[in-house]
Amino acid sequence: MEAPLQIVPGVPTLVLTGGWEPLYEEIAGYLRETGALHRTAAGGHRPQDSAEGNRVIRGSSPTSAGSSTRTRPS
């Protein structure tokens, strides 16, 4: 069984990666292309546990600006 790699329309989705694992970044890039907001925060395997990751999570919303872009498929 394959995992569906798509975003549910209308549901804001944040993908937070640590920027160190090429496979995670590739998956995050695909999800960004389908509508997710991708942010990168230092923190190795668990960026959500870093101070930077915590700021990203707390500051993210469908309209918040940041270093990564949110794109919608054409």
Image (spheres, helix red, strand yellow):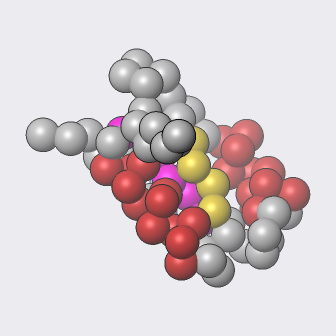
Does residue 47 belong to the magenta stretch? no
Q: Residue at x 67, y 69 (%)?
A: 18
Q: Residue furthest front?
A: 1
Q: Dividing the picture into quarters, in which one does residue 41 lie?
A: bottom right
Magenta stretch bounds:
35-40
Residue depicted at 54% across the width and 72% down the height:
23
Which image quarter holds the C terminus?
top left
Q: Which quadrant of the structure image shows residue 16?
A: bottom right
Please state which of residues 26 and 35 is positioned toward the viewer in this rendering: 26
**Which residue shows up at 44% across the image and 43% down it?**
5
Looking at the picture, does residue 47 appear above or below residue 11? below
**Is residue 47 shown above or below 70?**
below
Is there any visible trace of residue 62 in the rendered image? no
Q: Main secondary structure of the magenta part?
A: strand
Q: How many marks?
A: 0
Measuring from the top left, give residue 37's x and y in whole percent.
Answer: 47, 46
Does residue 33 appear anywhere in the picture? yes
Q: Residue 30: image x %, image y %?
A: 38, 55
- Image position of 32 with respect to 72: above or below: below
Where residue 1 appears, as percent x and y from the top left, is 53, 40
**From the viewer's perspective, is 30 left or right of 11?**
left
State the residue lying farthest toward the left: 74
Say which residue appears at 64% left-offset and 80% top-offset: 20
In the image, residue 23 above or below residue 6:
below
* Residue 47, horizontal then vertical, whole percent: 76, 63
